[in-house]
Amino acid sequence: MRFGSTSLLLLACGFSSAACGLFPSNDTPPASTTEWTLHAVRVDTVGYLPGRAKVATVVLPAGMTGLSDATAEIFDTNDNLQWACSLTGPMTDAALNITYYLADFTEFDIDGSQDGSYYLKVPSLEPGSGTNPAARSATFSIGKNVFADALGSAMTGMYGQRCGTAVKIALGTDTWQHGACHQQDAYLDYLTGDTASSASVGGWHDAGDFGKYVNNGAFSVGMLLAAWDHFQPTLTALSLPIPEHGQIPDGASAPMPDFLWEVKWELDWLLSAQQASGGGGVPSKLTAVNFESYGTMPDRDNQKRYFAGIGTAMTADFVAVMAEAARIYLPHDSGSAGKYLAAAQLGYAYLGANAGPAVPANDNPSDTADLVFQTGHYTETDPDNRLWAAAEMWETTGDPAALADFETRAAGTELLPDFDWGNVQNLGFYTYLLSQRPTEDLTDARSPTLVASLTADLLTAADGLVAASKAQAFGRALGDNFYWGSNGSVARSAMLLWVANVLGPDPKYLDTIQMQLDFLLGRNSYDRSQVTMLGYHPPLHPHHGPSSADGVADPWPGLLVGGANDQSRMLTPSDFNWIDDENQYEVNEIAINWVTPFVYATAALTPPPM
Ligand code: 9MR
Ligand code: ZN
C-alpha cells in the first residue's frame, strides 16, 4: 500500500480544472491502519522519470556481507518480469552501519504511470518460491508526471499551516480541520511598551508549533517565489483545494493562480508585521512567551501572543521577499504588488539607516536571567540577509545603488553547497545569476567578473553535490551530514542543482534532483517516505500540534519531517537518527522551511500540462 494515488485523476484533469479537485475521494485506507513491511530494496516509492536517473539501494540483512548473485529484476504488479540489471557492490557505509548494493535501472523507461506499477526484487535474497516481500522493494511508478501529486500535496500541506482562519482538508476517508485561530495577534508590549494589539492575523504556523517567525516565513516564501520564477508554467496550472481557488484579485481581470494565492496568505501577514512607526523595521516574530502546550488545537490556543523586537536580519528577509513579490504579483494583482513594493522600499530604507541590531535582544532563548521569550529564534547575523535583500531590490527596481550594495557584499560572501535559514545568501546569488533585467543601461549591468566567478563557484558547488550524491548509499547530496531539519536541506539542494543546470546544462544536475527526492520518498535507511500521507509508509506521528490534537489518526498531509539529526539529544545510533515519534521534535517535527523546498524540488521535476 502506498499513498498519493490521486495523481492519475489530477493529471487527467490537466491539474488545472476547477471541476477536478486535487484530492478526489478515493478508497485509500487511513495510513495509520496499514501494515508495513521493511523492504531490503529501497526505492523512490513515488516514482521515477523517463529519461532520468533511476537508482535503488539494496540493503543487506545485518551480518550478510555479499550476494551470491548480484542481479536485480523489475516486475510489474502482475508479477511479470520486465527487466533485469546487474548490481554494483557490495559497499559499506560506516556512518549508517550498512552493507549495500546499488541497482541502476536508468535505462528501463517503460512508462508505468499508473500508481505503483513496478517493484524491484533481488532473486538471491529470496530463493525458492520467491515470495518474501522483505527481499523486494515497495512499489513505484515511472512516468513524466510522477511528482505532480507530491507537489500538490506539499502545497496543500502549506495551506494546512494557515493561521488566522478556519482550515479544512478532505482526502480519501480523512478530513483535517480547525476553526479560526489566533484572532488577537499581536500584542505590542515588547515592541513599544503599549499594551494594545496591532492586527497581524494570518500567515502560516511555523512548524509543529503555532509561532510565526518573520525570518523563517520570509525564507519559506523565498523558496516558493524562486519556484515560481523557475517553474511558472507548472505552478500556474496547479489546482489547490483553497478557498481562493479561481478567484480574481481586486482590480484584476483574470483569476490568479492558486499557487500565488497560497503564498499571498503569508505575504500579507508579513506586510502586517512591518512597523511604519518604527521606521519600517520588522519584528523578529509573533509568538506567545512560551510554546503553547503540545496537544492543543490552534483554535483552542488562547495564550497572548506578542511581537518580539525589531532587528535588521528579519527586516532584510522581509525586504527580499516583498521586492520579489512586487515583480511577481504585478501581472496578477497590481494592487498587492504596489503594496509589496512600497513595503520593500520602506524596509530597505530602514536597513540603510540602521546598522543593527541584527537580532533583537529579547528574541534569543538562552539561559540568561533576563530572557523574555522561550520560543524559537531564526537568525544570528545579518550580512547574508542584507545581501539577499539587495539582490531582490535590484532585480525588481533596477536601482544601481542596490546593485552596488549587492556586489560589494557578494565579493566577501561565500556561496554555500547547502544552506538553511541561517545562511540565506544563496537566494540572492541565484537571483543575480539568473537575472532577467534588461542590461542595456550600463548602470544596470552586472559585473561580468562577478558573474563569472559566482558561476564558477556555483558549478563547483553543484558538482560537489553530484559527487556526494553518487558516493552516498542512498544518493543523498549532503552525504552523511545529518542535522536538525536536514531533510529540508536535502530538498533545498534542488535549487543549486537547478540553477547549475541553467548556467551549465548537464543532465547530471537534474538526475541529482531526482535522487534527492528518491531519498526523501523512500530510498533511505527506513524504507519510508518522509512526507506525511505520501508514498510508502510515511510518517504517522509527526511532531505537529494539530496532528496530535485533532482526534484524526492520520497526520495532516503533505508535510516533510525534519529527518535524521545526529546532534539530536534524544536518539540512539540504532535509530539511524530518525524515528517516527511525535515527541522527537528534533527529528520528527514538520516546518515550513522544509516543506517549501520540497515544493521547489517536486515542481522542478513536474512538466507543465501539455
Ligand atoms: O529549524 C530550526 C533548527 O535549525 C534549530 O536548530 C532549532 C533550535 O533552535 O530550531 C528549529 O526551528 C524550530 C523553531 O525554533 C520553532 N518552531 C519549530 C522549528 C522546527 O523545529
Ligand atoms: Zn493560528
Image (cartoon, grey):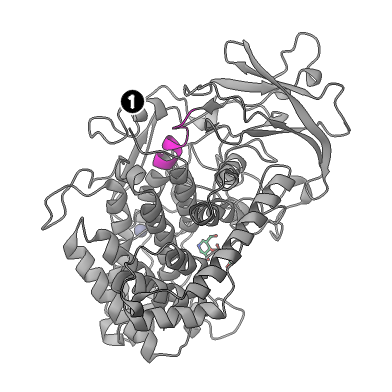
| Place of residue 331 in the rendered image (x, y in percent of width and height, measured from the top left) | 21, 57
150 lies above or below 133:
below
Q: Is 476 left or right of 144, judged from the image as shown?
A: right
Q: Is residue 248 part of the magenta span, yes or no?
A: no
Which span of residues is magenta-colored?
Answer: 143-152
- Residue 422 appears in view: no
- Residue 235: % across, % down: 34, 45
From the viewer's side, name the closer residue of 302 and 560: 560
Residue 118 or residue 218, whichever sits in front: 118
Quarter of the rendering containing residue 400: bottom left
Is 221 above or below relative to 89?
A: below
Q: Disc 1 marks which residue?
A: 12
- Identify the secondary structure beneath mark 1: helix
Residue under the point 61% across and 56% down:
462
- 52 left or right, relative to 526: left
**Residue 414 falls in image quadrant:** bottom right
146 part of magenta stretch: yes
Examine the image and state in which quarter residue 55 appears.
top right
